[in-house]
Amino acid sequence: MDLETAVRRAFAPATRRGRVGVEIELIPLAFGGRPAPERVAGVLDPRCAAGARAAFEAGGQLRLRIAPQPLPALLGTVAGVLRRVRERATRSGIALLAVGTDPQHAAADVPLLVPSPRNVVLQHAFDARGPDGRRMMRLTAALRVCVDLLPGRAGYEQWLVANLAGPHLAAAFANSPSLDGRPSGCAGARTGIWTRVDDRRCGYDGRHLDPRNPVGAYLAFAAAAPRLPLPDAGHLDALFPPVRPCGGCLEVRYLDAQPDERVPAAVRTVHTLLTHPVARATALDLLLPGLADLPTAWRQAPAGWSPLAADLLTIAADAEPALDEVLVR
């Protein structure tokens, strides 16, 4: 498949609407350091992780993927999965940290615990740009929110709001006070890591955005990113923008891993801002004038404060009571 076709498919709308899914990453710790993924996987029997698909990131971070579904059902599934997984891990001497960066280790302390060909290639490419690629791969954990992509103009609005809200929501939900196992002096060290990895692949300078031509801008971003020695089908998966179009949904990638009790608020906020038409339009009016300043906003976000964060949270909170009515129309 040629790149243009692949990008256009990535922006294809969902066949249904209003659903939301999540990927919850947790950092496993045991006595002596990070446990091997095989040890963690060994405690997650099918009943324990029922409702989620478990996998592991490069540094051994546990990833729990819960498929898109209506918001109330999703939050119920999340609560049950986290409760069961934590109980089982604790009995096996494993702590699962819901935090954006490992509070105990530097990248040099954590081996590449999932040395797949893709991870080895990515690590080599990131190493050429500096130390933050390894930090990202080995030390960080995220809460990713996947929202059904609407057709036409509404979908383009979702794309813009999801991206432009990024630094402000990352600041509002900052939960990564450590860098290389030490206090970093900022609340959002994970966001800081991402902004330094490689903008050619990550787009934290906004190079992948153009309100006049969202798909064309993303195609240009993808075409300009250096190719890695991976199958052509893997090129788009080797790009790590703050928001990734995934064919039927938008994957919001910039939130730090959240404490269990804070996951619902983060998911509800993203879902409402992208799904409720009034909230989306209000947020877009607030955010669009700041498009040119997006790189600056991302550089400021690790501090854990944003002048627009409170406004976005208010917009979402005000619209949420009417969200169910919108979804059943």
Image (tube, rainbow, N blue to C red):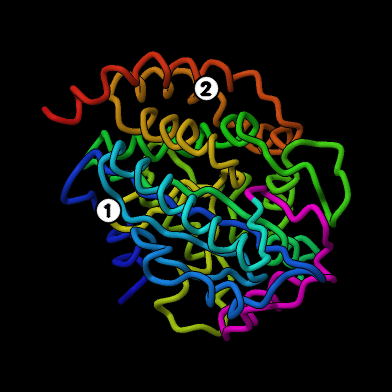
Q: Position of residue 224 (x, y in %)?
A: 54, 64
Please determine whether, in this image, residue 77 is positioned above or below residue 310: below
Please determine whether, in this image, residue 238 is positioned above or below residue 240: below
Q: Quadrant of residue 305?
A: top right
Looking at the rendered image, the disc whose residue lies closer to the viewer, 1 or 2, is: 1
Q: Is residue 250 visible?
A: no
Which region shows up in magenta? 98-127
Q: Specify the label residue 289 is tagged with.
A: 2
Q: Position of residue 287 (x, y in %)?
A: 50, 24
Q: Amino acid at mark 1?
A: Gly
Mark 1 or 2, nearer chain start: 1
Residue at figure coordinates x 47%, y 46% from the top left: 252
Mark 1 = which residue? 248
Q: Position of residue 39 (x, y in %)?
A: 61, 77
Q: Position of residue 181 (x, y in %)?
A: 85, 55
Does the stretch in magenta take in 102?
yes
Quadrant location of the C terminus in the rendered image: top left
Q: Is residue 23 visible?
A: yes
Please determine whether, in this image, residue 231 is positioned above or below residue 171: below
Q: Nearer the viewer, residue 23 or 132?
A: 23
**SS of the residue at dot 2?**
helix
